[in-house]
Image: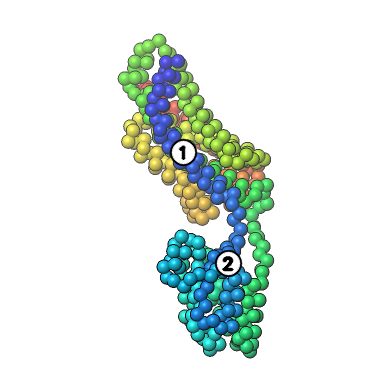
Amino acid sequence: MQVFNAFMKVLKKNLPTVIIWVAIFLSISIIVSKSGSENSEFKSKVLNVCVFDEDNTESSRAFRDFIASKHNVYELENDDDRILDELFYETKDYVITIKKGFSENLSDGITEGLFDNRYVHESYSNVLMTNLADEYVKTVRAFLAKGDNLSTAQKNAADTLSLNVEVTKETFKEEHIYSDDYSALFSAYFQYLPYVFLQILVSALCPVLLTMNKKNIRNRTNCSSIRPSSQTFQIFLGSMIFVLGLWLLFMISGALLNEEFYRGRALLAVLNSFVFILISTGIAILIASFNPGRVGVNVLSNIISLGMCFLCGIFVPQEVLSDSVLSAARFLPAYWYIRVNNMLSGVSGEIFSSSLCMKFIGIEVLFALAIFAAALTVTKIRHDKA
């Protein structure tokens, strides 16, 4: 097994590239899994608010009470340095000053310049707080226009803005067995595997094959007692061990991210990823058979992986790609991989069909066979000329 041992020694030198890609992908997957586990439903955030009432009237106190019904209101010394410290260290989120003349201006229909708002940075919560004050003023003005006096208008405005509206989230996707968080993680994890497989195999496996197929190394091997068939078998064995190990690493990592990752129809995603890593292996062997050199491998790696990912719907969803782009993408294996992934995850609205999934996976198998056949043909032609 001298050739096999030499293959592994050369592969070991290219492992840093593999480790970098694996670490990047798994780090992103962990972040996605953590964010996906959080509840994505909107909840109104309760802020720590300081209210300074310079008007000190019944109307301004009513407005302060309205804010207190929505947020935590705190007393604070009206000192600029103290206020800035509280905001900077985020012990308080928002400071609002009710300016003098608030009651009179509100009665006269003046809605600008009633408040002075202070906060450290823009955020959704701070914007909602500002909008809440604006909505209060507008609602009070509406009740005043209706004929209510200021006290009644403020009470009616507070009651109106305190009403809770029941919101129902509708989905027009096919009903499927996965929760939204599970589906998002599942889709994201398998969505980008083709890009990772292509980058790793072309960047790591191609240089090894180029080294093993150098003319002087091959000539010395041919002069030894090792038969050409045994030499080819040992290189093939080394390649398959590396490919299978890489595939198992990603499948086990997926199971660790979610203990129920592979259940039900998700097993088809496992099969789909296995077929595509074989396609990626065939592409790496085909590139190496042309002997493009190290620089050429890096260039081809980026062109093939990025080009296929953008055209086939990996980086850009297929539903937003034009018909002409999708027509061209049908001649690439990643297009059929994504069609399967979309049906399994349910994120694209495609109706799941096990027979259709197997049909698309079968098309990928045909791509793999064609690529391996082309690689073997090119390799034979080059060896015959040598």
Q: Residues within 10 Å of mark 1 (few under 14, many from 20)?
A: few
Residue 311 percent coordinates (x, y): 46, 48
Amino acid beneath label 1: Ala
Give the position of the N terminus as an image quadrant: top left
Residue 283 visible (yes or no):
no
Please give the residue where the numbered disc 1 appears in the rendered image: 23
> Which label number is shown at residue 210?
none
Residue type marked 2: Asn
Instruction: State whether residue 256 is above or below residue 96.
Output: above
Query: Is residue 145 found left or right of 16 in the rendered image?
Result: right
Height in image: 247 above or below 142?
above
Q: Closest to the observer: 310 or 10?
A: 10
Task: Please tell me which residue lies in front, 260 or 354.
Answer: 260
Relative height, residue 136 to residue 236 (above, below): below
Q: What's the CA distance linking mark 1 and mark 2?
A: 43 Å
Residue under label 2: 72
Q: Measured from the top left, where is residue 135 in percent x and y? A: 56, 76
Q: Earlier in the sequence, mark 1 or mark 2?
A: 1
Seen at 57% across and 50% down, the residue is: 36
Q: Quadrant of the C terminus?
A: top left
Give the residue at x 51% y 75%. 52
How crowded pointer 2 is (Cα within 10 Å; few <14, some 14-19, many 20+) is rated as: few
Q: Check disc 1 and report its element: helix, strand or loop.
A: helix
Q: Nearer the viewer, mark 1 or mark 2?
A: 2
Above or below, comparing residue 268 to residue 66 in the picture: above
Q: Determine whether the residue tagged by mark 2 lies in a helix, strand or loop.
A: strand
Task: Where is residue 109? Give x, y as percent.
Answer: 53, 87
